[in-house]
Amino acid sequence: MNTPARPIQDVMVAGPRLTSLGRPTLFELLRSCRVTSAALLLWWLASLYPLWDRGLQDNLRSAADATTTGSLGNQLLVLSFALLGAVHLPQAIPALRARRESRILFGVLGVYLLWSAATLLWSDDIDLSIRRLGILILVLIGAIGLGTGFYAQSHERTLRIARHVQWAAWTAVATLVASRLWNSNLLDLLDPDWMLKSDTRIEFYVFPVSYGLVAALVLYPFGKMKQTLTVLMFGLVLILLKGRTMLAGAVAASLLVSARMSRHLLWRGISFAFGLFLALVQVDLAAGGRIFRWFVDLVADGFPSLVHYLTIGHGIDDLVNLSGRVPLWQTLWPYFWDNPLAGHGFGAFWNASRFEAIDPEAGWLAVAAHNGFLDELLATGIIGLVLVLIFWFVGIRVSLRLATEDERGSSLVFGWLALFLLFNSMSSLLQCPFLSPNLFSLAALFTLLGPSWEIAS
């Protein structure tokens, strides 16, 4: 006897029953699903367009004007991302209400948002705080709607967002080759002094490629050849970009995910040990890199050629000073002690007047602390940093708990959330919610929190 078809509204809220073949859900057959996928591709291409510009130093010098008036391009990207999520928000809300884990996560997130809003009362730049807080709220709307309301409604769930991010990574690689590497030869690439940092915002390539690297471990657990080639290609791109600490963070997250995915006990132990070691190195760097700098001084005399490559021809002092970050952080700590508990206001520390004050003290033009944890301390104080870290660690805990429902999705979300935190050791992400690591990590987390799928036999 045939079973009557369920109304599509019930399917979208409670989650469809899948056949053992994993056929597309009714939601995936809707035109809105295909339109959203196409819109996401166009959105990503639009976000990569500024990377064709070679005027990095000019962009840095105009940062004060962009901070004061806001970047129209970034505002349009954030607004369009939020609108894409808002379309699917009606499907997301009922699914999230049914999850006890989501209530805990949203409770912590709500407290952080309330605290961030409270910092408007003492903000150094209230207009900037309001604009940045609005961006955070829009990013959350987009991530929740796309995560739980779009990706979680497909039969692949987290694997679908993993594929999309991997396509985004390949698109970024193609952009890099076409705009930066097309005229380079092998000798240039092998030259220790060769680098792209002088005219390229390498982190905007490193972010998607690193997330795509972790995704490859989850997408191809049985296709070892495809997995190996993808990992090697993305790894080679990261090496060429010479984002040394970001490369270490990507390798650490990848090893930790590999330890979770592998069925071989020895490899799991080796991957976990090396992954944990590299993660602890990132923790040390986030705290000022004292152990790292001591180790660099210790081995510099023994491996001069390796040190020359690691410093990109800038000498040992560059590595010891963490590419100028140490004097910058020393300049910023007194500002933190001005208001250690409450900070200078959400998103308000790096205002136009602050650029002018810090530039001569740090010795170079900085528009962020290049340390997400320090930037959070400067913005929302110790209270804000504790709250936002609780949110991310609760997210990691949730991803581990849901491994019984979705083992591969759990590993993906765990790896991306860990990668996000590791990137904050030397990059400012916590106070920059519109950057791709925030979008990828949050959307994947809310995808995992979507309705649990019941596999029909």
Image (cartoon, helix red, strand yellow):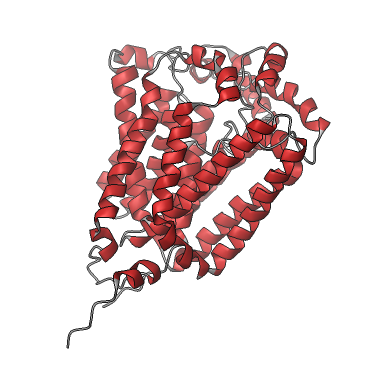
Q: Position of residue 104 (x, y in %)?
A: 61, 63
Q: Position of residue 344 (x, y in %)?
A: 74, 33
Q: Nearer the viewer, residue 248 or 334?
A: 334
Looking at the rendered structure, the number of numbered marks drawn on it comes to 0
Q: Nearer the viewer, residue 455 or 447?
A: 447
Dividing the picture into quadrants, the one containing residue 407 is: bottom left
**Figure check: 108 above or below 128:** below
Q: Inspect this view and state whether residue 150 appears.
A: yes
Quadrant where the C terminus sits is: bottom left
Tell me which residue sits at (33%, 12%) in the image. 187
Q: Position of residue 337 (x, y in %)?
A: 81, 31
Tell me which residue sits at (54%, 30%) in the image. 245
* Residue located farthest toward the left when viewing the structure as drawn: 1
Report the side of 95 relative to 287 (left or right): left
Q: Inspect this view and state whether residue 271 appears.
A: no
**Figure check: 252 above or below 368:** below
Report the side of 347 relative to 153 (left or right): right
Quadrant where the N terminus sits is: bottom left
Q: Position of residue 16 (x, y in %)?
A: 32, 70
**Figure check: 66 above or below 419:** above
Dividing the picture into quadrants, the one containing residue 60 is: top right
Tell me which residue sits at (76%, 39%) in the image. 121
